[in-house]
């Protein structure tokens, strides 16, 4: 290389060395920083691993909070930015209009609010009382959570089932509904087994599901589990078309007082109240009540006679005009006591009652029923000790008539004939579970006893009234 070439190379290198610091200083002088801490808004606890996004137009910058919640987004050109922070278990937060100046630092502390995240809910219906994750359950099961229930005003539980996979809910009025699963049902819905806190919730004599008669309140529902498929056979007779299980809140898990008032079209008003408390770590209680009234849609069945005839009609109603009463009126209440003598033993006692003052219910072959003064009472005792579960329950239905000649209770609108239903069902159930091979094999086994005593005054089962008691018992594994 000649001396001239060497001189030119050294001159160029010197220019680069001198110019680079000047250019770099000018570039960095035009950028700024956004920094601060990410904390929990309730506790003030610093939050680690929060994702911070700093955006201006299509330009994005990022940062992650450290162990003390601190973060630092650097090399931001001067301008206005939108800052978004996200962290699993917390609601995302976005703050717009954050200004960054050249060679300056903008301090921005980010407060996050905790959010409930349900990645894999726990259910008990799939294996009949055995708690397990819904993804691990050996069955097709859907869950309507308490959050969804609280968001939607409803007259009965059927109103929550509209979007449940495999289930069709057919409305016959404001309060009358038919829950259909796994094929065709009929107007008198009874093919799906409906439970409330593990006990039967249908009318004993006909084994028909009338959600309007169920005890308790919407405010007290913890979740609704719907079990479809062959696994429903674990519940024995009357469960082939699936199981719908309404589970209420424990006083140990949900304490305090909740009150609500709902209103709407057709003069509908509903008021609910729930109160639960814990006297000690071993004793809890809850009380719940609900009142609803409204006016149903006015439809007259062409098959309803006017006036009433005289055959099978109480003398006091014979020959009178057949006039539907479209008013709805219902009152319901439930009381529960939970006792936990030890950490692995739980005793739960429940009593509930519903009075359907006025309403209209559909039947299969006899048209509509004018319900009056229909009461439904249940008594239940549950016990759970480790993996042993047992319960006794008694449900009693009374359609409001003591005899087929009474006039103060429920009757058929087509004929005027009384419905006498003083039916009862008694159930006793016992279940246990064992694990083998280090938990690789799980066995659930138990036995059931069900006694149904219709007592319908010959108005439902006719001349077989004295011979229609049903006793069912069986075992499963």
Image (cartoon, grey):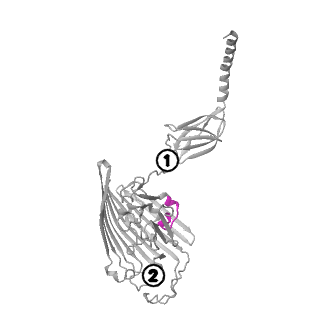
- Are the residues tagged 1 and 2 within 8 Å (C-beta)? no
Q: Residue at x 49, y 70 (%)?
A: 177
Give 447 or 250, whichever is nearer the viewer.
Answer: 447
**Magenta-drawn segment:** 148-160
Q: Residue at x 68, y 19 (%)?
A: 15
**Residue 60 at x, y percent in the picture:** 61, 39
Query: Which residue of the protein is positioned furthest toward the top in this rendering?
Result: 3
Q: Is residue 127 above or below residue 352?
A: above
Secondary structure under tag 1 reads loop
Q: Is residue 453 left or right of residue 187?
A: left
Give 192 or 88, whichever is nearer the viewer.
Answer: 192
Residue at label 1? 89
**Residue 319 shows in the view:** yes
Q: Alpha-carbon neighbours of circle 2 within 10 Å: few (<14), some, or many (≥20)?
A: many
Q: Residue at x 57, y 46 (%)?
A: 93
Q: Is residue 343 above or below residue 180?
A: above
Residue at label 2? 411
Q: Alpha-carbon neighbours of circle 1 within 10 Å: few (<14), some, or many (≥20)?
A: few
Secondary structure under tag 2 reads strand
Membership of 130 in magenta stretch: no
Which quadrant would residue 63 be assigned to in this image?
A: top right
**Residue 104 shows in the view:** no
Membership of 156 in magenta stretch: yes
Q: What kind of secondary structure does the magenta stretch mostly adopt?
A: helix
Q: Look at discs 1 and 2 and give the one toward the viewer.
A: 2
């Amino acid at each position: 290389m000649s001396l001239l070439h060497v001189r030119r190379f050294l001159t160029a290198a010197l220019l680069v060395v001198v110019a680079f610091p000047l250019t770099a200083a000018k570039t960095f002088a035009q950028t700024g920083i956004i920094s601060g801490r990410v904390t929990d808004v309730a506790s003030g606890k610093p939050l680690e691993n929060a994702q911070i996004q700093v955006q201006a137009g299509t330009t994005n910058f990022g940062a992650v909070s450290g162990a003390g919640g601190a973060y630092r987004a650097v090399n931001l050109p001067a301008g206005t930015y939108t800052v978004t922070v996200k962290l699993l278990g917390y609601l995302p937060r976005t703050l717009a209009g954050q200004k960054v100046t050249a060679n300056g630092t903008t301090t921005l502390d980010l407060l996050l609010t905790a959010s409930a995240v349900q990645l894999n809910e726990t259910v008990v219906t799939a294996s009949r009382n055995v708690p397990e994750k819904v993804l691990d359950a050996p069955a097709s099961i859907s869950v309507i959570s308490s959050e969804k229930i609280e968001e939607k005003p409803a007259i009965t539980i059927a109103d929550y089932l509209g979007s449940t996979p495999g289930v069709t809910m057919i409305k016959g009025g404001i309060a009358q509904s038919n829950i259909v699963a796994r094929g065709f049902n009929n107007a008198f819905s009874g093919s799906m087994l409906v439970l409330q806190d593990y006990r039967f919730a249908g009318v004993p004599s006909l084994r028909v599901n009338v959600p309007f008669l169920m005890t308790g309140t919407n405010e007290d529902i913890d979740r609704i589990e719907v079990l479809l498929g062959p696994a429903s056979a674990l519940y024995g007779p009357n469960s082939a078309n699936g199981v719908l299980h309404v589970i209420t809140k424990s006083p140990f898990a949900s304490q305090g007082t909740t009150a609500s008032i709902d209103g709407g079209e057709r003069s509908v008003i509903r008021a609910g109240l729930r109160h639960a408390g814990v006297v000690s770590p071993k004793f809890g209680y809850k009380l719940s009540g609900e009142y609803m009234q409204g006016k149903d849609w006015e439809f007259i069945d062409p098959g309803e006679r006017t006036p009433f005839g005289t055959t099978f009609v109480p003398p006091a109603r014979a020959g009178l005009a057949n006039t539907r009463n479209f008013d709805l009126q219902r009152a319901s209440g439930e009381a529960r006591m939970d006792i936990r003598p030890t950490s692995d033993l739980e005793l739960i006692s429940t009593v509930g009652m519903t009075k359907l003052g006025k309403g209209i219910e559909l039947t299969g072959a006899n048209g509509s029923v004018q319900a009056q003064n229909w009461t439904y009472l249940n008594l239940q005792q549950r016990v759970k000790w480790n993996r042993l579960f047992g319960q006794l329950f008694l449900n009693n239905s009374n359609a409001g008539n003591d005899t087929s000649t009474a006039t103060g209770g429920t009757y058929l609108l087509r004929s005027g004939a009384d419905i006498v239903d003083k039916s009862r069902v008694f159930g006793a159930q016992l279940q246990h579970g064992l694990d083998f091979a280090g938990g690789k094999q799980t066995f659930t086994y138990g036995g059931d006893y069900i006694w149904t005593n219709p007592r319908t005054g010959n108005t439902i089962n006719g001349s077989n009234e004295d011979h229609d008691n049903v006793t069912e018992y069986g075992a499963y594994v």
